[in-house]
Amino acid sequence: MSARAQRVLELADDELILDWRDSERTGIAPTLEEDVAFSSIAQNEIGHARALYELAAGELGTDADALAFDREPGEYRCAQLVELHLMDWAHTIARRYLYEEADRVRVEALKRSDDAELSGLAAKIDREETYHRLHAEMWAARLHDEPRFRAAVEELWPYALGVLDPELRPELARRVGLSVESTQAVERGEHRPELAELWSEMTEVRRSAPGQQW
Amino acid sequence: MTIYEVFRQERKGQPFAHAGSVVAPDATFADAWAREQYGRRGESEALWLVPREAIHQITEWADEFDLKYRRVDGYSIKARLAEARERAGTAST
């Protein structure tokens, strides 16, 4: 697999798995309004995952659904940040915030890529992310002095660093006011045991009817 | 928390109609929440968010002297219109 396809799959897998995780909040977010908004944003991001899978699929001679659902858990390229099964809102919104900030840095870098297809898609994703970022930022601003939120951000920081290539990490640290040196990044490559559980649920319908057109 | 009444314009040029409300701590949250709740499916051209307290409501009406002549009930505009059309020679058949 080319470095480009692998890069695109990292992004697509991050988006798909995080939005699967965020969808687990549907019905139990802190307020009715946030419930609708959080679920809606998750759905929107799955659209980004699809566009990225389609880009990779063109190169790999397959299709987006096969990439999203037919690989083994060990073949996914997502960062551990998105795999974590988080039970409380402080951690859930802290992860969303850290991910949005990391993703912003990553998408900015991709927009400067020489690969026109990739930089074009990055620019398109970037335009749609504006409101997702506002959503994450307003929560971060509101919970800034809330000890549970601060603790969650610090706990998730090593995982957030692992979303990005090392050269992009200082920019993320600057944006969120933390330091790269303060911790050891949880690097991409290894998976958490809960990814297998998520995968089993996520692919269950597809596996129940192999080759079916939906 | 503040209740924001949400008014939705479906298409450009159409009047805004009351769509519902969102309960939010401030205008930023109200914006983010209303955006997803009333606009995520492309169903709105524009939204107005108005704090409920900002709305001045009128429900009391004085009509002590039964001023029937100011009301339109019993006044048949249809007949009047037909007459006028006939006079103008544009009566519809």
Image (cartoon, helix red, strand yellow):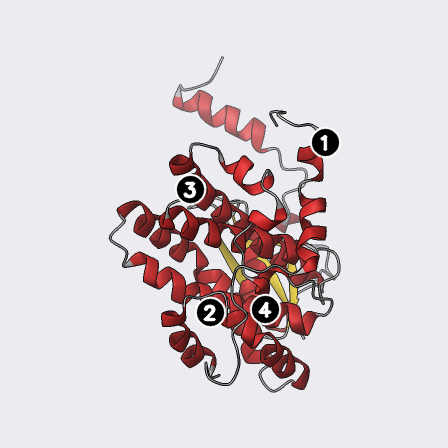
Q: Is residue A93 left or right of residue A61?
A: right
Quickly name the residue at label 2.
A101
- Residues marked 2 and 1, same chain: yes
Query: Which of the two labelled residues, at mark 1 and mark 4, occupies the earlier sequence position?
Result: 4
The residue lying toward the viewer, choosing from A172 and A60, is A60
Q: Nearer the viewer, mark 2 or mark 3?
A: 3
Q: What residue type is labelled 4?
A: Arg
| Pair 1/4: label in front | 1
Residue type at mark 1 is Ser
Q: Residue at x 43, y 23 (%)?
A: B87
A67 or B82, which lies in front?
A: A67
* Mark closer to the chain start, 1 or 3: 3
Which SS class for mark 4? Answer: helix
The first of marks 4 and 3 along the sequence is 3
The mark that comes first in sequence, 2 or 1, is 2
Chain hosting mark 1: A
- Tell me the quarter of the image containing the C terminus of chain A: top right
- Residue that numbered label 1 is attached to: A208
Q: Mark 3 points at which residue?
A: A56
- Give coordinates of residue A127: x percent, y percent: 39, 56
Q: Position of residue B25 (x, y in %)?
A: 63, 75
Mark 4 vs mark 3: give the one in front: 3
